[in-house]
């Protein structure tokens, strides 16, 4: 099969994250506004072209105060860096339907190479005859690598916000005409 263009279906997709809080729990959040450019053969992603963009100001942790802090210069600095982007540079098949997708992640003006474990979840037609494909992706990044270093020491030792951020994407895309 040849590469075809796929349009992200945001109403059936999500970009979620979690980070340790007070060294005892995980706080979860999501980004509500994101987009992707995908050109791929879902049965073999090794030749795919994948670009992803997230509006950092669309962060939602179910706490207005925390969200306000996250968009400030202490974290995402949305005023100067409104988007986080990812462009795949290498895709390696690790098993049937499983891939390591490596690429350039840019956040807060810093670009680093990151790898995400991607699974092709399947392909089929919806009731209206539209071809759909599903993918999931997981990865972990260190927020301090991107200049997100704000923290507070805890009286009991340790820090308020962990450095490792776990990322989870659930993506559904429609074959573009």
Image (cartoon, grey):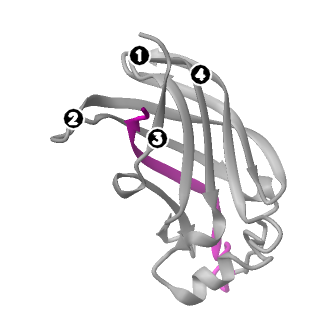
167 within the magenta span:
yes
Per the image, the residue denoted by label 2 is 129
Which residue occupies the extreme bottom position in the image? Answer: 65
Mark 1 lies on residue: 95
Is residue 3 shown above or below 111? above
Residues at marks 2 and 4, CA–CA distance in whole angstroms: 30 Å
Answer with mark 2 or mark 3, whichever residue precedes in sequence.
3
- Mark positioned earlier in the residue sequence (4 or 3): 3
Question: Element type at marker 4?
Answer: strand
Quadrant occupied by the C terminus: top left
Q: Which residue range is magenta in the image?
A: 154-177
For label 1, count other residues whose C-alpha is less than 10 Å away and answer few (under 14), some (14-19) or many (20+).
few
Per the rendering, the mark at residue 7 is 3
Q: Which mark is residue 91?
A: 4
Q: Secondary structure at mark 1?
A: strand
Q: Where does the image place residue 34, in percent across and percent down from the top left? A: 55, 56
Asked if residue 141 lies in the magenta stretch, the reply is no
Residue 124 in the image: state x and y as whole percent. 24, 30
Name the front one of labels 2 and 4. 2
- The secondary structure that most of the magenta stretch takes on is strand
Q: Looking at the image, is mark 1 or mark 3 nearer the viewer?
A: 3
Q: Position of residue 5 (x, y in %)?
A: 50, 29
N-term mark: 1 or 3: 3
Mark 2 vs mark 4: which is more N-terminal?
A: 4
């Amino acid at each position: 099969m040849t590469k075809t263009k796929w349009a992200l279906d945001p109403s059936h997709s999500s970009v979620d994250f979690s980070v340790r809080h007070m060294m005892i729990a995980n706080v979860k959040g999501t980004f509500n506004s994101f987009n992707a450019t995908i050109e791929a053969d879902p049965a073999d992603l090794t030749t795919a072209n994948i670009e992803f963009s997230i509006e950092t100001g669309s962060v939602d942790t179910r706490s207005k105060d925390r969200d306000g802090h996250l968009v400030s210069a202490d974290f995402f600095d949305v005023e100067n860096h409104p988007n986080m982007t990812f462009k795949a540079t290498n895709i390696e098949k690790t098993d049937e339907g499983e891939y390591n997708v490596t690429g350039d992640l840019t956040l807060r003006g810093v670009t680093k190479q990151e790898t995400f474990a991607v699974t092709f979840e399947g392909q089929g037609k919806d009731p209206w005859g539209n071809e759909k494909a599903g993918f999931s992706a997981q990865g972990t990044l260190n927020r301090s690598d991107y200049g997100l270093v704000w923290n507070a020491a805890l009286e009991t030792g340790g820090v308020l916000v962990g450095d490792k951020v776990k990322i989870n994407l659930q993506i559904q895309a429609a074959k573009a005409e």
